[in-house]
Amino acid sequence: MGGSILLDYAVYFEAPLKETIDVCILFSPDGQENQPKLWGSFQLWLKDFDGRWFDQFWMMFTSSQVFRQQVKKFYGIAGATQRQEHIQKIHHQLQTAVRMLGNLGYKVTDMGSGGTQQSAYIAAEQFPKEVLEASNAAGFRVEPQRIAAGGLVCQPIANLQAGGAFAQLMADWAEGGLQPGHHYAGWHESIRTCSLVPSSIKVKMLEKTPEVASAVQHSLNGTLAYHDLAKLRSGRDYFSKINMDTLLSNLQITEVPEITSHLDEADQRKVLRWMCRGLHEGMAIQKVLIDNVATEQQRQRSKQARANGSSTGSTTDPDQMV
């Protein structure tokens, strides 16, 4: 970098509950040791920061310019101006939706976007039924009086995409053009493993199938595409039949990964199954969310076919394949 690379970090009041830490990397240009400038900041798990993971990360960061560029891209550090413009657009779209909710008699109690985890949300005493259904199908966190997108730990890019998708859903609704929920679910493709450094956790798994091995290799090469995960099939294997505790035991972990906290228990089991089959946690989450979108799309097609008086065909639920 042409100078000294420095490290700073902060643990905020609410962070210990989520077991996260905010890391800041600074650099001092040659001859300006007392004037460090912010290179970038991102969020990590405390367990990674305190362990061998970060030791390896820091060694690679300080010794490799290529790795530093990978870090910028991976953690969304580059393009700050474009990111801020995107956040402003999200805020404007949410404001438009909030005004429409108020005009229709729905009392909105809070709204927000941005923040350290790039979450976007609207809180109201009640929501229109169609908004709840579409938000649920899109994979947003739906509660009786709150709908939120983003907020996933160590997922800055996916959080920004999720916030944009939620804002677009609300804007479309306000303009009378709400699409089926799966139309807004593309943000799932931005979820990735939370690490540029291979995990040191040893996981017990079956030998990878050629399809799984190929997907993992694409991920390592940075060329993983939507269809690489969409086409994966497991059949009714051993992991399809065992319960949550046994899945955790096979993975030699005591609880489900924190990154899956936004999923319901059924989807968490699916993630663990794909981890057992050889996908790391980020890829496993992507696989489950992609399957959920495919199921919703098939249901919508069947629903449309019934409405047109056509044969419904058969609906394949990915849960039957995992």
Image (cartoon, rainbow, N blue to C red):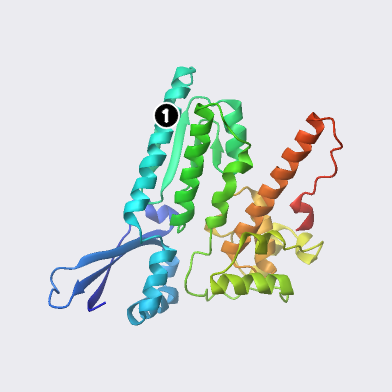
Q: Position of residue 223 (x, y in %)?
A: 57, 69
Q: Where, quadrant-wise, is the N terminus in this rendering?
A: bottom left
Task: Count how many numbered circles sit on residues in the image.
Answer: 1
- Taking the image as drawn, is residue 86 in sight? yes
Residue at 47% in and 23% down:
101
Q: Name the residue at the bottom extreme.
A: 63
- Residue 72's place in the image compared with 188, above or below, is below
Q: Quadrant of residue 201?
A: bottom right
Which residue is drawn at the image coordinates 72% and 61% (left, top)? Answer: 231
Please give left or right for residue 49 compared with residue 234 in the image.
left
| Looking at the image, residue 207 lies above or below residue 243 | below
Q: Amino acid at mark 1?
A: Thr
| Residue highlighted by disc 1 | 96
Quadrant (top left, top right, bottom left, bottom right) of the C terminus:
bottom right
- Which quadrant of the view contains residue 189? bottom right
Is residue 137 at least partly visible in the picture?
Answer: no
- Name the quadrant containing residue 233: bottom right
Q: In the image, residue 55 lies at what x, y percent? A: 39, 77
Question: Does dot 1 land on a helix, a strand or a loop?
Answer: helix
85 and 14: which is toward the camera = 85
Q: Nearer the viewer, residue 171 or 14?
A: 171
Q: Nearer the viewer, residue 126 or 310?
A: 310
Where residue 161 sits: x, y (%)? 48, 49
